[in-house]
Image (cartoon, grey):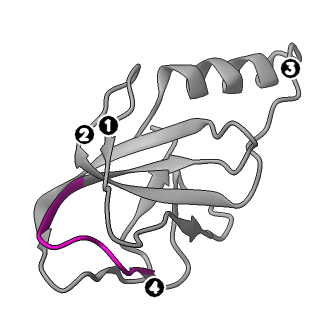
Amino acid sequence: MSATDAAESRVLNWLTGNSTTAPTLPLKIRLMTANGSDSAAGTEVAGGSYAPQDFEADATSSDEAVNNDLIRFEGIANPTTVVGFEVWDSAGTPFRWHYAALDSPRTVTDGVLEFEAGALGITCA
């Protein structure tokens, strides 16, 4: 998973004391049907009763934080092929922090997509 250009800028400003900007929690995982890039968001799953899900992770001593619990998305329109995910905060105008492609696309045919604990991670690398 990669930090967005805007997230990298916010982190550098925070580290140098030029800003106190931090994510508005909880962080949210959004599923993508087309992946984004450092500078542009991907195309989020649409239709059905799909909704972004909370991303909760324990503090880590490595350069990665992974989801603590199962993340379950329900109500995804069928069929939908999910190719990646993004991490956004919960601000009034949400901010995109990270993005990643899945190891392999997953086609949803029953409206449900799950990620086991430890399957999704945020890295600083």
Please say if 62 is above or below 42.
below
Q: How far is mark 1 from mark 2, CA to CA?
A: 4 Å
Q: Looking at the picture, which amino acid does disc 4 mark? A: Leu
Q: Residue at x 75, y 42 (%)?
A: 92
Please state the horizontal and vertical placement of residue 11, each as a whole percent of the image. 69, 27
Q: How far is mark 2 from mark 4, CA to CA?
A: 22 Å
Residues drawn in magenta: 72-83
Q: Nearer the viewer, residue 28 or 98?
A: 28
Query: Which of the marked residues, 1 or 3, is nearer the chain's N terminus?
Result: 3
Q: Looking at the picture, which amino acid does disc 1 mark? A: Gly
Query: Which of the marked residues, 3 or 2, is nearer the chain's N terminus?
Result: 3
Callout 4: 10 Å neighbours few (<14), some, many (20+)? some
Callout 1: 10 Å neighbours few (<14), some, many (20+)? many
Q: Circle 4 is placed at which residue position?
A: 70
Q: Circle 1 is placed at which residue position?
A: 42
Q: Nearer the viewer, residue 23 or 113?
A: 113
Q: How far is mark 3 from mark 2, CA to CA?
A: 29 Å
Query: Which of the marked residues, 1 or 4, is nearer the chain's N terminus?
Result: 1
Q: Circle 2 is placed at which residue position?
A: 35
Mark closer to the observer (1, 4): 1
Secondary element at tag 4: loop
